[in-house]
Amino acid sequence: MSASTGAVAPDIAAAVAALRAGELVAFPTETVYGLGADARNPEALRKVYALKGRPSTHPLILHVLSADDLKDWVSDIPAPARALTSRFWPGPLTIVLPRSTRVSDELTGGQDTVAIRVPAHPVARALLAAFGGGIAAPSANRYGRVSPTRASHVREEFPEGLLVLEGGDCEVGLESTIVSLVDAVPRLLRPGSISRADLETVLGESVKVGSSADTPRVPGSTVQHYAPQTPLELVPSGALSTAEAAAAARGERVVTLACPPSSDPATYGRRLYAELRRLDKLGASRILVESVPQSPQWDAVRDRLSRAAATFL
Ligand code: TXA
Ligand code: MG
């Protein structure tokens, strides 16, 4: 919108100038804040890995303005990709496809596939429109830490003067669903607010969970992810006060995160990372988190909680 009228907001204009100069910019999306770089500038992409402390073999997610941009980045757009993009873009879905020869190794971590999404957040869209190209962006947190869901979280992660576009609290609050369309069967690589059932409904076929032996490793699938600094322990549903009392009896100071029976997964997911950051600052020896329901609607939340807990096993 702003690009076509010529009236680009000052912060967007500054962000575009930074991207064109090969600098990094943090920006809001509907899922979490991203740490963005010009996706066609390998030098800028290397800065993303350096600032995050992320291994250079772990690929980034490419953000583009619309599904029409896919052709510039992938070698083939199979029918299932068209079905998913017309239903879910703009929105919290990332699709993995074979990359075009013009895509750099820095973007894909050296793999022959590329992960792409079209974000829905108006600030992300204004930035993409004004920039006029693709923006590579992992979540704007240091490697292995909790993803940021508000601008102040990004400033906590990177205090040294990174340009951060303000976009309020992220509406989804958990990272996008990632589906790979590289193999003969679609594979869910990371659960998110768009569920496996949502994908299967649109695709008209079943979606496998997890990567095949030859699918590249997803950093989110290693245990050192989504973790606060304070050890996090999952306790069975309904057992929070017992566990808290037991800890208190041992003289241990713990903090708790409950999951009342009335909780809905969307609201819980939206608040989870901000809550973990808040609890992490209370100087407790452990964060006790009540387990969430086993039902599919809770898959994304359960996935993030179990990874955060697994770090300290
Ligand atoms: O919601 C999101 O997706 C956010 C916002 C900023 O868009 N981004 C995000 O990026 O979560 P990051 O880097 O924290 O996670 C990117 C995930 C990683 O798990 C990575 O391995 C996976 O995407 N990924 C990227 N390219 C891939 C590829 N070619 N094949 C398989 N997985 C890929
Ligand atoms: Mg991340």
Image (cartoon, rainbow, N blue to C red):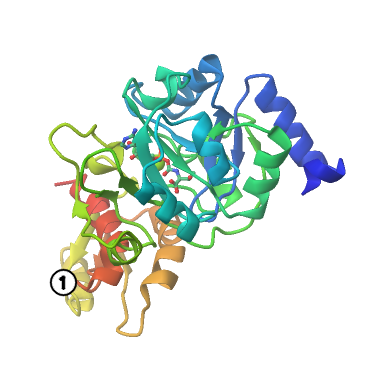
Name the residue that disc number 1 marks. 236
* Closest to the observer, 124 or 65: 65
Q: Tell me if residue 43 comes above or below residue 309 in the rendering.
A: above
Examine the image and state in which quarter residue 266 appears.
bottom left
Res. 120 image quadrant: bottom right
Secondary structure found at label 1: loop
- Decide if residue 253 is on the left or right side of residue 263: left
Q: Categorize mark 1 by other alpha carbons within 10 Å: few (<14), some (14-19), many (20+).
A: few
Determine the residue positioned at 46% across, 55% down.
92
Q: Is residue 263 visible?
A: yes
Residue 99: quadrant of the picture = top left
Q: Residue at x 16, y 31 (%)?
A: 214
In the image, residue 140 sits, relative to residue 235, either above or below, namely above
The three-letter amino acid code for the residue at tag 1 is Pro
Question: In the shown orientation, is residue 249 left or right of residue 304?
Answer: left
For the question of whether residue 281 can be seen, the reply is no
User: Between residues 14 and 65, which one lies in front from this camera angle?
Assistant: 65
Establish if 32 lies above or below 77.
below
Question: Residue 114 at x, y = what percent?
Answer: 39, 32
Asked if residue 102 lies left or right of residue 177, the reply is right
Which quadrant of the figure shows ligand 2? top left
